[in-house]
Image (cartoon, rainbow, N blue to C red):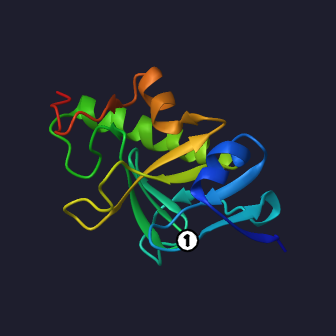
Amino acid sequence: MGKHLIISTAAITAACLGSGISVSIALGSPATTTTDDARPSYGRCGTGPRVNCIVDGDTLWSNGVKIRVADIDTPEISQPNCAAEKALGEQATLRLIELVNIGPFAILAWRNRDKDRNGRELRVLVRGGRSLGDILVSEGLARTWTGRRQPWC
């Protein structure tokens, strides 16, 4: 079973990113890190309990907490405005599943907001000092979040 450490967010940023340690941060409580052997596997969310799964390209459940990837916007798959949006949204979803399963990543607080209007925790996913959202943007599967949604069709 993984070892657990209590460390500060400054220590996470300075020492943990890219070191092979999986990091999860919840505002208002100490940060918890676990070694790679305790890292969960993420699949696509289904109809059952949602613990560690991907909803779409910018929403996931991690340790039973619903998270909105705060630094990006991806096309919708549940209520797309056109077939092209649905197709690109499916690609973004599959790519996010790949990215979170490649290796450990940090879940970091987003600026000065904890939750979005739907109650999802706003977080940024980071591995090796790079946002996983930025990877999706660079691959044309997401846009950098500007504060409002833009049409995909």
Q: Residue at x 82, y 70 (%)?
A: 2
Where the N terminus falls, by quadrant?
bottom right
Q: Residue at x 50, y 52 (%)?
A: 108
Question: In this view of the protein, which residue sits in the foreground, 25 or 73?
Answer: 25
Can you give x and y, in whole percent of width and height, for residue 89 in the image? Answer: 35, 38
The secondary element bearing badge 1 is classed as: loop
Can you give x and y, in whole percent of width and height, for residue 21 in the image? Answer: 75, 53
Question: In this view of the protein, which residue sits in the foreground, 32 or 143?
Answer: 32
Q: Which residue is mark 1?
A: 63
Q: Quadrant of residue 65?
A: bottom left
- Residue 103 visible: no
Q: Residue at x 69, y 50 (%)?
A: 104
Q: Amino acid at mark 1?
A: Asn
Q: How many marks?
A: 1
Q: Is residue 56 left or right of residue 116?
A: right
- As displayed, is residue 71 above or below residue 117? above
Can you give x and y, in whole percent of width and height, for residue 28 in the image? Answer: 45, 72
Can you give x and y, in whole percent of width and height, for residue 35 in the image? Answer: 79, 61
- As displayed, is residue 77 above or below residue 138? below
- Residue 50 visible: yes
Q: Quadrant of residue 80?
A: top left
Q: Is residue 39 left or right of residue 76?
A: right
